[in-house]
Image (cartoon, coloured by chain):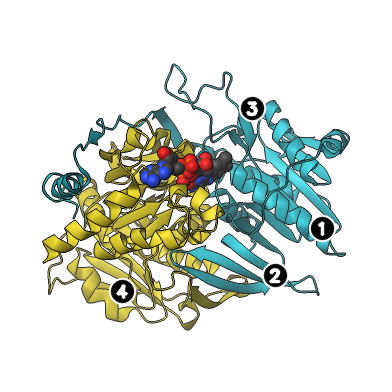
Amino acid sequence: MRILSVVKQVPDSNAAVKVQADGHGIDANGLKLVLDPFDEFGVELAIQLREKRSDVTEVVAMILGPDKASEALRVALAMGADSGIHINDESFQSQNELFAAHVLAEAIKKQEQPFDLIVCGKYNIDLDSGAVGPALAEFLGWPHVGAVQGLEIADDGKHFTARRRIEGAEEVIEGDLPVLLTIEKGLVEPRYPSLPNIMKAKKKPVSVITGSDLSISQDLKNATEMLSISPPPPKPDCKFIEGEPEEMAKELVRLLREEAKVV
Amino acid sequence: MSNILAFIEQRDGKILPASFQLLALAGKLASSTGGQAEACVVGDSVSGLTDTIASYGAKKIYTVEDASLARYVASQYTTALSAVIDAASPKIVLIPTTFMGRDLASRTAARKHAALAIDCTDISIEGADLIAEKSTYAGKLSAKFKLSSAGLQIATVRSNVYAASEPQAGAAAEVQAVAVSLTDNDKRLTCKEVVSTSSGVKDVTEGDIVVAGGRALKSEENFKIIFDLAEMLDGAVGASRAACDAGYQPHSRQVGLTGKVVTPKLYIACGIDGAIQHLAGMRGSKVIVGINTKADAPIYKVATYGCVIDLFTLVPLLTAEFERLKG
Ligand SMILES: Cc1cc2nc3c(=O)[nH]c(=O)nc-3n(C[C@H](O)[C@H](O)[C@H](O)COP(=O)(O)OP(=O)(O)OC[C@H]3O[C@@H](n4cnc5c(N)ncnc54)[C@H](O)[C@@H]3O)c2cc1C
């Protein structure tokens, strides 16, 4: 069984993300970038499967992004992925997840050895969309299960049962590999790479795929275009309610009923 | 190519109320495209739902019925929705932002090579293009996307951003059954069962009102006062990651970046600091109440109303006050 973990580099969730002067993108200056926390769940799941099962032969991590994205790829390798693939071309940069999925699919089709399982995060914390996984599966003609929070793969290495999160319930999905899974929080706890593993990761093989290696259709790229990005309109200042506890409770309830009209 | 198609999400014959909000939006957009609001509903037995769907403003309803569509499976529903898109040739498809909607929209957009925007908080038409606004970077920034009118445009819409119209009993709509032939490839996965995880209490994504507790609650038992208030308001219970990690509440109630994203009309944050990752999950709520002993807690940066007080004092008083008014 070969497992592919698709990852992305995104701004750290603690970072203040600032807008570029032209309003068309975010200011990368001094911005701390990390491996997306949901993609991290995918990497962790893949390496746990390799550690637990004798039939998992290789875990490959794949990233689409500029030169700097190699840092996030190295984190995946330090966590335990065996090798990396970095798709890096100026013409592949976009804020369009369907286009990204198309590029990833073309790169996966180019691989000599097939994969049996592809994992990626439920969504990425930059665009908050989650289209990459389902769209990638569609472009590959694979089935997928989104937002997986429980997984069992039978001893035969084929049949699987996945538990998918929905509102207030779980869907229990069954089928055979190959499949693409997008991973929800709670399935695995990502490990911190140890110092020796960080050193080892520097020597792991990473192949680079560039624009001339793939036949990419630009139609998808132009279908959805980011026009502008800005901080959300500021919220009006918080109205603080003063007084003794009983008065405070009465006044808050009154405001919720009469001013905000939400109860 | 000027009609707007709303995907009506249903499970076990129960329609997701946010679907009706989409019909109202579809009607509004259709008036500027010169088309009409249409609906699509998929399942094993959905023809009994068409009167209700019509009452919320759909002028034409496409139904797809097949025994194997009883439960949601991505590839099968993608094939069903694609069949309706082929039959109806809409200009725009609107889908609720839910676990089903995000999944289905993404896969369908890939199949139909459509323009796509997920979890939109504002949708309008400029020229012929669809302009969709959505929150990005965990709610820190809001981005505007242009979905080209050159092809199909698909958008999922956040619940409670648009209001549903008042239902008109007896409103008529044309109903068209669309045949679908699911391929073996579509049927590679099956949904065996759907297991409830909400244990009687409303799921946090389903409450119009959410009462949430943080680390300050200190124990699972102490959450009782949060549940009491939620029950009084017919709301749902949420929690911060710190409260879930400490075992006070299951992770299914976690709100935030790595938990659930909620946009209720009222969110009451009790003993929650307001870390950026928590705000990512609730800052889109219409009204936010912060209850926190620390006057400079970051929750007050997004709160509409703030009460700087011990939550163990105030929360039971709030429950009592609501009870008193209920009579
Ligand atoms: C990648 C990543 C993802 C994350 N995802 C999430 C997520 O999805 N959801 C999430 O919530 N967090 C998330 N976090 C964690 C987040 O950073 C915070 O650590 C967490 O939200 C803190 O929870 P809290 O506010 O309950 O606890 P604390 O930060 O401990 O705050 C407790 C608050 O209670 C107040 N307080 C104490 N006693 C009382 C009292 N008696 N009455 C009233 N107020 C009182 C205190 O003043 C304080 O403000 C994430 C972090 C990372 C790095």
- Chain letter, disc 4 residue: B
- Return the mark for residue A90: 3
Q: Residues within 10 Å of mark 3 (few under 14, many from 20)?
A: few
- The residue that disc 1 covers is A50
- The residue pinned by badge 2 equals A152
Residue A68 at x, y percent in the picture? 69, 27
- Label disc, if present, on residue B176 of the rendered structure: 4
Looking at the rendered structure, the kind of residue marked 2 is: Glu
Foreground disc of the pair 3, 1? 1
The amino acid type found where label 1 is placed reads Arg
Q: Residues within 10 Å of mark 2 (few under 14, many from 20)?
A: few
**Chain that appears cyan:** A
Left or right placement of residue B71 versus residue A31 in this view: left
Q: Colour in which chain B is shown?
A: yellow
The chain letter for the residue carrying disc 2 is: A
Q: In the rendered view, does B162 fall on the left or right side of A111? A: left
Badge 1 sits on which subunit? A
Mark 1 residue element: helix
